[in-house]
Image (cartoon, rainbow, N blue to C red):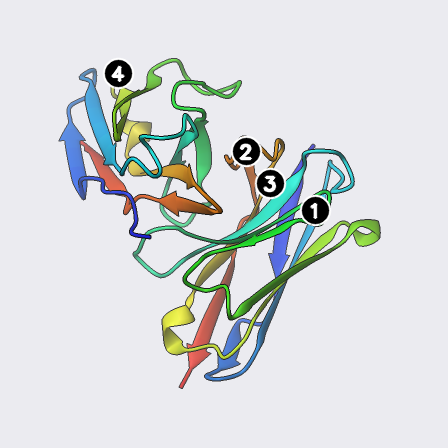
Amino acid sequence: QVTLRESGPALVKSTQTLTLTCTFSGFSLSTSGMCVSWIRQPPGKALEWLARIDWDDDKYYSTSLKTRLTISKDTSKNQVVLIMTNVDPVDKATYYCARTSDHAKYYFDYWGQGTVVTVSS
Amino acid sequence: QSALTQPASVSGSPGQSITISCTGTSWDVGNYNLVSWYQQHPGKAPRLIIYEVTERPSGVSNRFSGSKSGDTASLTISGLQAEDEAAYYCCSYTRYNTLFGGGTKLTVL
């Protein structure tokens, strides 16, 4: 079955770089059409899409955060990594990775359980 | 781009039907049939319940249905049940980006 699991530091300091890893199973990111996105949710607030990487290594970023984000994949390890630079306390959130099984459909059919990140000032 | 607009809260009694709206623009909801809806219980990850405006994933109750008119998409839940109490988020593709709504808290009275 399809599973995704996020991992990374629970606490980072303001201005530092945050690195999050999504490790998945049950599908391959080398399969045509497959994509993985990162989505976050500040406490008590709405979901916010951050970035997506496709099976063919195409990458897409939120227009408001694109200067701070880098997404990459390691197909052999079934992992997707998100790097966020210059973090701020407003970046405190639960970070989810989620799968899209058809690059043209833009919906998220499987989600990880999320990882909570706090940013200290 | 701004988030899609949803009512902050809706409520209904068991057995009733409710509808949650999701208003975008001609650049997103109005231009693409790529609206999806997610249900999120407290402390849990979101769960896909509607995709491509009207389609239901396997395993999702047929009490959930979606529609769209112009720049506004809607989620209807019929025959409300206690377990439907959750937050609901709409989502739409827009060119090179993906937008979520602000979320709607459904209370089952």
Please tell me whether residue B6 is drawn above or below residue A73 in the rendered image: above
Amino acid type, callout 1: Phe
**Residue placed under numbered mark 3 in the picture:** A99
Q: Chain of mark 3?
A: A
Q: First in sequence: mark 3 or mark 1?
A: 1
Q: CA distance from mark 2 to mark 3?
A: 6 Å
The three-letter amino acid code for the residue at tag 4 is Ser
Question: Callout 1: 10 Å neighbours few (<14), some, many (20+)?
Answer: many
Q: Which residue is denoted by mark 1 in the rendering?
A: A24
* Residues at circles 2 and 3 in contact by the CB criterion of under 8 Å: yes
Q: Are marks 1 and 4 on the same chain?
A: no
Which quarter of the image is occupied by the N terminus of chain A?
A: top right
Amino acid carrying mark 2 in the image: Asp
Q: Secondary structure at mark 1?
A: strand
Q: Amino acid at mark 3?
A: Arg
Q: Earlier in the sequence, mark 2 or mark 3?
A: 3
Quadrant housing the C terminus of chain A: bottom left
Q: In which quadrant of the rendered view does residue A65 lie?
A: bottom left
Which residue is identified by label 4? B78
Residue B61 appears anywhere in the view: yes
Q: Position of residue B14 (x, y in %)?
A: 20, 20
Give the spatial CA distance, label 1 vs label 4: 35 Å
What residue does disc 2 label?
Answer: A109
- Horizontal side of B54 relative to A104 (left or right) equals left
